[in-house]
Image (cartoon, helix red, strand yellow):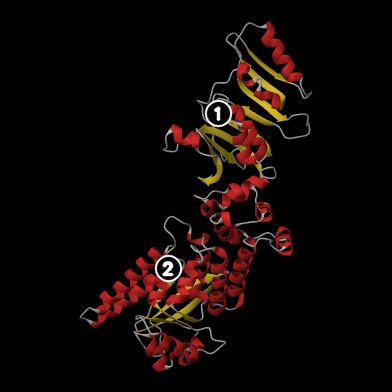
Amino acid sequence: MTLDDGATSEAMVVEAVRAARAQTRDADVIDGVKKAVADELIRLDPNLKIKKTEYFNHSYIPDMVATWRESGKPQERRVFIRGSLSTMVASEDVEALSDQNPLLISLGDESRRIVKQLRAQMPKATRTLATEVSATARISSGERGTDREAQLSGLVRANIVRGGRGVLTDADADRIVAVEHQKPVEALKAFQQTVQKLFVGSTAERLTRTAGLLSTFFEERPSGAVLGALREEPLSDGELRVVLPYVLHRAADVRSPDVWATLGGMLTLERIESLAPALSDVDVTPLIRPVVGALTAGRSALFFNADETSDEQKDAETPRWKVQNGKLAANVHRWSLWMGSDGRKIRGRDDGADARWDELSSPLRSFDLAAIELHGLSRQLGVSNPKPGAVREDVELFRRTIDDDFHVASVTVREEDQPETPEVKVEFAASTATGKAPVSFHVRVASLLAVKRPFSDADVDELIGK
Protein backbone atom coordinates (compact mmCIF):
# COMPACT_ATOMS: atom_id res chain seq x y z
CA MET A 1 0.00 0.00 0.00
CA THR A 2 1.30 3.46 -0.83
CA LEU A 3 0.72 6.56 1.22
CA ASP A 4 -1.52 7.88 -1.56
CA ASP A 5 -3.67 4.74 -1.32
CA GLY A 6 -4.00 5.28 2.44
CA ALA A 7 -4.92 8.92 1.99
CA THR A 8 -7.58 7.96 -0.55
CA SER A 9 -9.11 5.35 1.79
CA GLU A 10 -9.03 7.79 4.69
CA ALA A 11 -10.71 10.50 2.64
CA MET A 12 -13.43 8.09 1.50
CA VAL A 13 -14.46 6.95 4.96
CA VAL A 14 -14.14 10.41 6.51
CA GLU A 15 -16.32 11.82 3.73
CA ALA A 16 -18.86 9.00 4.20
CA VAL A 17 -19.08 9.77 7.93
CA ARG A 18 -19.32 13.50 7.27
CA ALA A 19 -22.12 12.99 4.74
CA ALA A 20 -24.01 10.75 7.15
CA ARG A 21 -23.76 13.22 10.03
CA ALA A 22 -25.03 15.99 7.75
CA GLN A 23 -28.38 14.25 7.27
CA THR A 24 -31.41 15.96 8.81
CA ARG A 25 -33.23 12.84 10.00
CA ASP A 26 -31.76 11.01 13.00
CA ALA A 27 -32.50 7.65 11.40
CA ASP A 28 -30.53 8.63 8.29
CA VAL A 29 -27.61 9.81 10.41
CA ILE A 30 -27.51 6.52 12.31
CA ASP A 31 -27.87 4.36 9.21
CA GLY A 32 -25.21 6.33 7.33
CA VAL A 33 -22.67 6.26 10.15
CA LYS A 34 -23.19 2.56 10.80
CA LYS A 35 -22.84 1.79 7.10
CA ALA A 36 -19.60 3.79 6.86
CA VAL A 37 -18.11 2.01 9.88
CA ALA A 38 -19.31 -1.44 8.77
CA ASP A 39 -17.83 -0.89 5.30
CA GLU A 40 -14.55 0.11 6.90
CA LEU A 41 -14.43 -3.05 9.03
CA ILE A 42 -15.09 -5.20 5.96
CA ARG A 43 -12.26 -3.44 4.13
CA LEU A 44 -10.00 -4.36 7.02
CA ASP A 45 -11.09 -8.00 6.98
CA PRO A 46 -13.33 -9.18 4.12
CA ASN A 47 -14.06 -12.41 6.00
CA LEU A 48 -15.99 -10.59 8.73
CA LYS A 49 -19.77 -10.52 8.94
CA ILE A 50 -21.29 -7.42 10.53
CA LYS A 51 -24.54 -7.56 12.51
CA LYS A 52 -26.01 -4.13 13.27
CA THR A 53 -28.02 -3.67 16.45
CA GLU A 54 -31.00 -1.39 17.01
CA TYR A 55 -28.95 0.84 19.30
CA PHE A 56 -26.67 3.79 18.58
CA ASN A 57 -24.09 5.33 20.90
CA HIS A 58 -25.50 3.37 23.84
CA SER A 59 -23.41 3.23 26.99
CA TYR A 60 -23.34 -0.57 27.29
CA ILE A 61 -25.01 -2.06 24.21
CA PRO A 62 -22.90 -2.25 21.03
CA ASP A 63 -23.80 -0.53 17.78
CA MET A 64 -22.80 -3.64 15.83
CA VAL A 65 -21.14 -7.02 16.28
CA ALA A 66 -18.36 -8.34 14.06
CA THR A 67 -18.47 -12.14 13.68
CA TRP A 68 -16.16 -14.70 12.07
CA ARG A 69 -15.13 -18.33 12.40
CA GLU A 70 -11.79 -19.46 13.75
CA SER A 71 -10.76 -23.13 13.71
CA GLY A 72 -14.38 -23.89 12.87
CA LYS A 73 -15.73 -22.08 15.93
CA PRO A 74 -17.84 -18.89 15.84
CA GLN A 75 -16.17 -15.78 17.28
CA GLU A 76 -17.39 -12.22 17.77
CA ARG A 77 -16.33 -8.74 18.84
CA ARG A 78 -18.65 -5.98 19.95
CA VAL A 79 -18.20 -2.63 18.27
CA PHE A 80 -19.10 0.68 19.96
CA ILE A 81 -19.21 3.90 17.92
CA ARG A 82 -18.35 7.15 19.69
CA GLY A 83 -18.29 10.70 18.39
CA SER A 84 -14.73 11.25 19.62
CA LEU A 85 -11.97 9.77 21.76
CA SER A 86 -12.55 12.59 24.25
CA THR A 87 -16.06 11.19 24.75
CA MET A 88 -14.51 7.82 25.59
CA VAL A 89 -12.19 9.50 28.09
CA ALA A 90 -15.00 11.47 29.75
CA SER A 91 -17.28 8.43 29.96
CA GLU A 92 -14.44 6.12 31.04
CA ASP A 93 -15.65 3.66 28.40
CA VAL A 94 -12.38 1.74 28.49
CA GLU A 95 -12.97 0.67 32.08
CA ALA A 96 -16.76 0.46 31.94
CA LEU A 97 -16.79 -1.84 28.89
CA SER A 98 -13.61 -3.79 29.59
CA ASP A 99 -15.51 -6.98 30.43
CA GLN A 100 -16.77 -7.07 26.80
CA ASN A 101 -13.28 -6.77 25.18
CA PRO A 102 -14.81 -4.21 22.81
CA LEU A 103 -13.67 -2.34 19.74
CA LEU A 104 -14.27 1.38 20.34
CA ILE A 105 -14.30 3.51 17.18
CA SER A 106 -14.16 7.30 17.22
CA LEU A 107 -15.58 9.26 14.28
CA GLY A 108 -13.35 12.31 14.78
CA ASP A 109 -9.67 13.26 15.03
CA GLU A 110 -8.19 13.95 18.44
CA SER A 111 -5.24 15.78 19.95
CA ARG A 112 -2.19 14.01 21.39
CA ARG A 113 -3.34 15.07 24.86
CA ILE A 114 -6.60 13.13 24.54
CA VAL A 115 -4.79 10.09 23.13
CA LYS A 116 -2.37 10.20 26.07
CA GLN A 117 -5.26 10.36 28.55
CA LEU A 118 -6.95 7.43 26.84
CA ARG A 119 -3.77 5.33 26.99
CA ALA A 120 -3.49 6.12 30.69
CA GLN A 121 -7.01 4.76 31.27
CA MET A 122 -6.19 1.48 29.51
CA PRO A 123 -5.50 -1.39 31.94
CA LYS A 124 -2.21 -3.14 31.09
CA ALA A 125 -3.95 -6.47 30.59
CA THR A 126 -6.74 -5.01 28.49
CA ARG A 127 -8.15 -6.60 25.36
CA THR A 128 -10.05 -3.42 24.50
CA LEU A 129 -9.08 -1.61 21.30
CA ALA A 130 -9.80 2.10 20.89
CA THR A 131 -9.16 3.76 17.55
CA GLU A 132 -10.25 6.46 15.13
CA VAL A 133 -11.95 5.63 11.87
CA SER A 134 -9.26 7.66 10.08
CA ALA A 135 -6.56 5.34 11.49
CA THR A 136 -8.21 2.14 10.33
CA ALA A 137 -8.76 3.70 6.91
CA ARG A 138 -5.02 4.22 6.49
CA ILE A 139 -4.41 0.47 6.57
CA SER A 140 -7.67 -0.90 5.20
CA SER A 141 -6.66 -1.08 1.54
CA GLY A 142 -3.84 -3.16 0.12
CA GLU A 143 -1.62 -1.91 -2.66
CA ARG A 144 -3.40 -1.92 -6.00
CA GLY A 145 -2.93 -5.14 -7.94
CA THR A 146 -1.46 -7.08 -5.03
CA ASP A 147 -2.62 -10.07 -3.05
CA ARG A 148 -3.67 -8.63 0.33
CA GLU A 149 -2.64 -11.83 2.10
CA ALA A 150 0.85 -11.46 0.63
CA GLN A 151 1.54 -8.21 2.49
CA LEU A 152 3.14 -8.10 5.92
CA SER A 153 0.84 -5.23 6.81
CA GLY A 154 -2.00 -7.47 5.65
CA LEU A 155 -1.37 -9.80 8.61
CA VAL A 156 -1.98 -6.87 10.94
CA ARG A 157 -4.90 -5.62 8.89
CA ALA A 158 -6.71 -8.95 9.11
CA ASN A 159 -6.19 -9.22 12.88
CA ILE A 160 -7.05 -5.72 14.08
CA VAL A 161 -10.76 -6.35 14.52
CA ARG A 162 -10.28 -9.90 15.77
CA GLY A 163 -7.53 -9.37 18.33
CA GLY A 164 -6.26 -5.79 18.47
CA ARG A 165 -5.94 -4.08 21.84
CA GLY A 166 -4.76 -0.77 23.27
CA VAL A 167 -4.94 2.45 21.26
CA LEU A 168 -4.45 2.53 17.49
CA THR A 169 -3.64 6.04 16.27
CA ASP A 170 -2.91 7.52 12.86
CA ALA A 171 0.81 7.33 13.68
CA ASP A 172 0.54 3.62 14.51
CA ALA A 173 -1.28 3.03 11.24
CA ASP A 174 1.46 4.84 9.33
CA ARG A 175 4.12 2.63 10.93
CA ILE A 176 2.19 -0.49 9.91
CA VAL A 177 1.86 0.71 6.33
CA ALA A 178 5.49 1.89 6.16
CA VAL A 179 6.75 -1.68 6.38
CA GLU A 180 5.61 -2.16 2.76
CA HIS A 181 7.48 0.73 1.19
CA GLN A 182 10.37 1.81 3.41
CA LYS A 183 13.82 0.25 3.77
CA PRO A 184 13.28 -3.06 5.57
CA VAL A 185 15.56 -2.95 8.62
CA GLU A 186 14.23 0.19 10.32
CA ALA A 187 10.66 -0.35 9.08
CA LEU A 188 10.61 -3.87 10.53
CA LYS A 189 11.84 -2.64 13.93
CA ALA A 190 9.06 -0.04 14.09
CA PHE A 191 6.57 -2.64 12.87
CA GLN A 192 7.53 -5.07 15.65
CA GLN A 193 7.17 -2.40 18.31
CA THR A 194 3.70 -1.50 17.04
CA VAL A 195 2.65 -5.16 16.90
CA GLN A 196 3.75 -5.70 20.50
CA LYS A 197 1.57 -2.77 21.58
CA LEU A 198 -1.50 -3.83 19.63
CA PHE A 199 -1.61 -7.61 20.08
CA VAL A 200 -1.15 -10.30 22.71
CA GLY A 201 -1.13 -14.09 22.68
CA SER A 202 -0.78 -16.21 19.56
CA THR A 203 -1.46 -13.30 17.20
CA ALA A 204 1.40 -11.26 18.67
CA GLU A 205 3.69 -14.30 18.62
CA ARG A 206 2.89 -15.04 14.97
CA LEU A 207 3.38 -11.46 13.79
CA THR A 208 6.52 -10.93 15.86
CA ARG A 209 8.01 -14.21 14.60
CA THR A 210 7.39 -13.26 10.97
CA ALA A 211 8.85 -9.77 11.38
CA GLY A 212 11.81 -11.19 13.31
CA LEU A 213 12.58 -13.69 10.56
CA LEU A 214 12.40 -10.97 7.94
CA SER A 215 14.83 -8.85 9.94
CA THR A 216 17.25 -11.79 9.98
CA PHE A 217 17.05 -12.17 6.20
CA PHE A 218 18.30 -8.61 5.67
CA GLU A 219 21.28 -8.89 8.01
CA GLU A 220 24.78 -8.94 6.52
CA ARG A 221 25.53 -12.17 8.39
CA PRO A 222 22.21 -13.88 9.14
CA SER A 223 22.11 -16.14 12.17
CA GLY A 224 23.19 -19.64 11.19
CA ALA A 225 21.04 -21.01 14.01
CA VAL A 226 17.92 -19.28 12.65
CA LEU A 227 18.53 -20.42 9.07
CA GLY A 228 19.34 -23.93 10.28
CA ALA A 229 16.11 -24.08 12.27
CA LEU A 230 14.18 -23.00 9.18
CA ARG A 231 15.77 -25.78 7.16
CA GLU A 232 14.66 -28.25 9.83
CA GLU A 233 11.17 -26.76 10.19
CA PRO A 234 10.20 -24.84 7.02
CA LEU A 235 7.68 -22.02 7.02
CA SER A 236 4.01 -22.78 6.44
CA ASP A 237 2.27 -21.80 3.20
CA GLY A 238 0.60 -18.92 5.03
CA GLU A 239 3.95 -17.60 6.22
CA LEU A 240 5.55 -18.04 2.80
CA ARG A 241 2.75 -16.03 1.18
CA VAL A 242 3.94 -13.06 3.21
CA VAL A 243 7.67 -13.70 3.54
CA LEU A 244 8.53 -14.51 -0.09
CA PRO A 245 6.96 -11.44 -1.76
CA TYR A 246 8.34 -9.17 0.95
CA VAL A 247 11.90 -10.45 0.48
CA LEU A 248 11.71 -10.68 -3.32
CA HIS A 249 10.50 -7.10 -3.66
CA ARG A 250 13.58 -6.09 -1.65
CA ALA A 251 16.04 -8.54 -3.19
CA ALA A 252 18.72 -5.86 -3.53
CA ASP A 253 18.78 -5.52 0.28
CA VAL A 254 19.46 -9.25 0.85
CA ARG A 255 23.21 -9.53 1.34
CA SER A 256 23.69 -13.23 2.06
CA PRO A 257 23.18 -16.01 -0.53
CA ASP A 258 22.37 -18.33 2.38
CA VAL A 259 19.00 -16.59 2.70
CA TRP A 260 18.02 -17.50 -0.87
CA ALA A 261 19.27 -21.06 -0.45
CA THR A 262 17.24 -21.46 2.75
CA LEU A 263 14.03 -20.02 1.33
CA GLY A 264 14.40 -21.83 -1.99
CA GLY A 265 15.03 -25.09 -0.16
CA MET A 266 11.49 -24.93 1.23
CA LEU A 267 9.99 -25.06 -2.25
CA THR A 268 8.80 -27.69 -4.67
CA LEU A 269 7.26 -26.90 -8.03
CA GLU A 270 3.89 -27.97 -6.60
CA ARG A 271 4.31 -25.54 -3.74
CA ILE A 272 5.28 -22.71 -6.08
CA GLU A 273 2.09 -23.38 -8.05
CA SER A 274 -0.02 -23.24 -4.89
CA LEU A 275 1.66 -19.96 -3.87
CA ALA A 276 1.28 -18.47 -7.35
CA PRO A 277 -1.12 -15.59 -6.47
CA ALA A 278 1.37 -14.24 -3.93
CA LEU A 279 4.31 -14.52 -6.35
CA SER A 280 2.82 -13.01 -9.49
CA ASP A 281 4.43 -9.91 -10.98
CA VAL A 282 7.69 -10.26 -9.06
CA ASP A 283 11.12 -11.41 -10.24
CA VAL A 284 11.67 -14.78 -8.52
CA THR A 285 15.08 -15.43 -10.11
CA PRO A 286 17.09 -14.93 -6.86
CA LEU A 287 14.85 -17.52 -5.20
CA ILE A 288 14.71 -20.09 -8.02
CA ARG A 289 18.20 -20.04 -9.52
CA PRO A 290 19.98 -21.50 -6.44
CA VAL A 291 17.60 -24.49 -6.33
CA VAL A 292 16.84 -25.29 -10.00
CA GLY A 293 18.70 -28.56 -9.59
CA ALA A 294 16.47 -29.58 -6.67
CA LEU A 295 13.11 -28.56 -8.16
CA THR A 296 11.45 -31.29 -10.23
CA ALA A 297 9.29 -30.55 -13.26
CA GLY A 298 7.01 -33.09 -14.91
CA ARG A 299 6.69 -31.18 -18.17
CA SER A 300 8.12 -28.08 -19.77
CA ALA A 301 7.06 -26.22 -22.89
CA LEU A 302 8.51 -23.56 -25.15
CA PHE A 303 6.17 -21.16 -26.93
CA PHE A 304 6.59 -17.81 -28.64
CA ASN A 305 6.83 -14.87 -26.23
CA ALA A 306 3.42 -13.18 -26.43
CA ASP A 307 4.38 -10.04 -24.47
CA GLU A 308 3.29 -6.85 -26.19
CA THR A 309 6.82 -5.56 -26.74
CA SER A 310 8.92 -5.25 -29.87
CA ASP A 311 11.33 -7.97 -30.95
CA GLU A 312 14.17 -5.56 -30.26
CA GLN A 313 13.00 -5.11 -26.66
CA LYS A 314 12.64 -8.86 -26.19
CA ASP A 315 16.12 -9.48 -27.55
CA ALA A 316 17.56 -6.90 -25.13
CA GLU A 317 15.90 -8.34 -22.01
CA THR A 318 17.79 -10.62 -19.63
CA PRO A 319 16.04 -13.97 -19.02
CA ARG A 320 14.39 -13.98 -15.59
CA TRP A 321 12.19 -16.42 -13.69
CA LYS A 322 8.62 -15.42 -12.84
CA VAL A 323 5.35 -17.04 -11.76
CA GLN A 324 2.59 -16.47 -14.28
CA ASN A 325 -0.82 -18.08 -14.76
CA GLY A 326 -0.11 -20.36 -11.83
CA LYS A 327 3.14 -21.76 -13.23
CA LEU A 328 6.87 -21.14 -13.09
CA ALA A 329 7.96 -19.47 -16.32
CA ALA A 330 10.73 -17.46 -17.95
CA ASN A 331 10.88 -15.23 -20.99
CA VAL A 332 14.03 -15.98 -22.96
CA HIS A 333 13.99 -13.17 -25.51
CA ARG A 334 11.43 -14.19 -28.16
CA TRP A 335 10.66 -17.46 -26.39
CA SER A 336 8.48 -18.16 -23.36
CA LEU A 337 9.54 -21.17 -21.27
CA TRP A 338 7.02 -22.86 -18.96
CA MET A 339 7.43 -25.45 -16.19
CA GLY A 340 4.70 -27.68 -14.76
CA SER A 341 4.86 -30.04 -11.81
CA ASP A 342 3.23 -32.75 -13.92
CA GLY A 343 2.12 -33.37 -17.48
CA ARG A 344 -1.42 -32.18 -16.81
CA LYS A 345 -0.29 -28.66 -15.88
CA ILE A 346 0.86 -27.75 -19.39
CA ARG A 347 -0.84 -28.47 -22.69
CA GLY A 348 1.18 -28.85 -25.84
CA ARG A 349 0.54 -27.20 -29.20
CA ASP A 350 -0.08 -28.82 -32.55
CA ASP A 351 1.98 -26.37 -34.59
CA GLY A 352 5.36 -26.56 -32.92
CA ALA A 353 8.68 -25.93 -34.59
CA ASP A 354 9.83 -28.24 -37.36
CA ALA A 355 13.21 -29.75 -36.46
CA ARG A 356 15.57 -31.50 -38.89
CA TRP A 357 18.16 -34.00 -37.75
CA ASP A 358 20.91 -31.99 -39.41
CA GLU A 359 19.97 -28.99 -37.22
CA LEU A 360 19.68 -31.01 -34.01
CA SER A 361 22.69 -33.25 -34.42
CA SER A 362 25.11 -30.79 -32.86
CA PRO A 363 23.03 -29.61 -29.82
CA LEU A 364 22.06 -33.24 -29.11
CA ARG A 365 25.72 -34.03 -28.42
CA SER A 366 25.20 -32.50 -24.96
CA PHE A 367 22.87 -35.40 -24.09
CA ASP A 368 22.67 -39.18 -24.24
CA LEU A 369 19.95 -40.31 -26.65
CA ALA A 370 17.63 -43.06 -25.37
CA ALA A 371 15.18 -43.03 -28.29
CA ILE A 372 14.32 -41.04 -31.41
CA GLU A 373 11.52 -40.94 -33.97
CA LEU A 374 12.46 -39.74 -37.46
CA HIS A 375 10.13 -38.79 -40.28
CA GLY A 376 11.51 -38.73 -43.80
CA LEU A 377 9.89 -38.13 -47.17
CA SER A 378 9.72 -41.83 -47.94
CA ARG A 379 9.85 -43.56 -44.58
CA GLN A 380 9.54 -43.25 -40.80
CA LEU A 381 12.09 -44.70 -38.41
CA GLY A 382 12.05 -45.30 -34.69
CA VAL A 383 15.23 -46.15 -32.79
CA SER A 384 15.72 -46.92 -29.11
CA ASN A 385 18.69 -48.37 -27.26
CA PRO A 386 19.69 -48.00 -23.61
CA LYS A 387 23.38 -48.21 -24.52
CA PRO A 388 24.98 -44.73 -24.52
CA GLY A 389 25.87 -43.59 -28.01
CA ALA A 390 24.06 -46.42 -29.79
CA VAL A 391 21.06 -44.35 -30.94
CA ARG A 392 23.28 -41.64 -32.42
CA GLU A 393 25.38 -44.22 -34.24
CA ASP A 394 22.28 -45.78 -35.79
CA VAL A 395 20.85 -42.41 -36.88
CA GLU A 396 24.13 -41.30 -38.41
CA LEU A 397 24.30 -44.60 -40.29
CA PHE A 398 20.78 -44.02 -41.66
CA ARG A 399 21.72 -40.49 -42.64
CA ARG A 400 24.74 -41.66 -44.59
CA THR A 401 23.07 -44.58 -46.35
CA ILE A 402 19.53 -43.35 -46.97
CA ASP A 403 18.91 -40.47 -49.33
CA ASP A 404 16.24 -38.63 -47.34
CA ASP A 405 15.79 -35.46 -45.31
CA PHE A 406 14.94 -36.69 -41.83
CA HIS A 407 12.85 -34.56 -39.48
CA VAL A 408 12.78 -35.36 -35.77
CA ALA A 409 9.28 -35.97 -34.43
CA SER A 410 10.52 -36.75 -30.93
CA VAL A 411 13.70 -37.56 -29.08
CA THR A 412 14.19 -38.95 -25.57
CA VAL A 413 17.30 -37.69 -23.79
CA ARG A 414 19.09 -37.96 -20.45
CA GLU A 415 22.23 -36.49 -18.92
CA GLU A 416 25.36 -37.34 -20.87
CA ASP A 417 27.29 -40.35 -19.49
CA GLN A 418 24.82 -40.72 -16.61
CA PRO A 419 22.58 -43.69 -17.50
CA GLU A 420 20.77 -43.63 -14.14
CA THR A 421 19.44 -40.08 -14.57
CA PRO A 422 15.80 -39.38 -15.58
CA GLU A 423 14.76 -39.43 -19.21
CA VAL A 424 12.79 -36.61 -20.85
CA LYS A 425 10.88 -36.97 -24.11
CA VAL A 426 10.94 -33.94 -26.40
CA GLU A 427 8.00 -33.70 -28.83
CA PHE A 428 8.57 -31.01 -31.42
CA ALA A 429 5.05 -30.69 -32.83
CA ALA A 430 3.71 -30.13 -29.29
CA SER A 431 6.72 -27.99 -28.23
CA THR A 432 6.88 -29.94 -24.97
CA ALA A 433 9.39 -31.95 -22.97
CA THR A 434 7.84 -34.56 -20.67
CA GLY A 435 9.47 -36.50 -17.86
CA LYS A 436 10.18 -36.04 -14.16
CA ALA A 437 13.56 -34.31 -14.07
CA PRO A 438 15.23 -31.29 -12.46
CA VAL A 439 14.12 -27.89 -13.71
CA SER A 440 17.75 -27.21 -14.63
CA PHE A 441 17.69 -30.18 -17.01
CA HIS A 442 14.37 -29.08 -18.50
CA VAL A 443 15.91 -25.66 -19.23
CA ARG A 444 18.74 -27.29 -21.15
CA VAL A 445 16.33 -29.60 -22.97
CA ALA A 446 14.23 -26.59 -23.98
CA SER A 447 17.19 -25.39 -26.01
CA LEU A 448 16.42 -28.27 -28.40
CA LEU A 449 12.93 -26.86 -28.98
CA ALA A 450 14.51 -23.47 -29.67
CA VAL A 451 16.76 -24.82 -32.41
CA LYS A 452 15.55 -22.22 -34.95
CA ARG A 453 16.53 -19.39 -32.58
CA PRO A 454 18.70 -21.09 -29.97
CA PHE A 455 19.37 -20.08 -26.39
CA SER A 456 22.86 -18.76 -25.77
CA ASP A 457 25.04 -20.16 -22.99
CA ALA A 458 24.59 -16.83 -21.22
CA ASP A 459 20.79 -17.21 -21.39
CA VAL A 460 20.98 -20.63 -19.76
CA ASP A 461 23.39 -19.35 -17.11
CA GLU A 462 20.95 -16.58 -16.18
CA LEU A 463 18.30 -19.20 -15.38
CA ILE A 464 20.30 -22.05 -13.84
CA GLY A 465 23.63 -20.48 -12.88
CA LYS A 466 27.05 -21.50 -14.06
Q: Nearer the viewer, residue 356 or 190?
A: 190
Tell which circle, 2 or 1, labels the residue nearer the N-terminal end: 2
Measured from the top left, where is residue 119 in percent x and y?
48, 87
Residue 24: x %, y % from top left: 20, 81
Residue type highlighted by circle 2: Ser
> How many residues crowd around disc 1 within 10 Å: few (fewer than 14), some, or many (20 or more)?
many
The 10 Å Cα crowd at callout 2, few under 14, some 14 to 19, many 20 or more, is many
Coordinates of residue 262 in the picture (x, y in percent): 68, 55
Query: Between residues 154 and 58, which one lies in front from this camera angle?
Result: 154
According to the image, label 2 marks what residue? 140
Q: Is residue 33 left or right of residue 367?
A: left
Q: Is residue 334 visible?
A: yes
Quadrant of the drawing holding the C terminus: top right
Q: Residue at x 57, y 87 (%)?
A: 125
Q: Amino acid at mark 1?
A: Ala
Q: Which mark is residue 430?
A: 1
Q: Which type of secondary structure does the marked residue at label 2 adopt?
A: loop
**In front of the other: 343 or 17:** 17
What's the residue at 42%, 68% (across, down)? Answer: 140
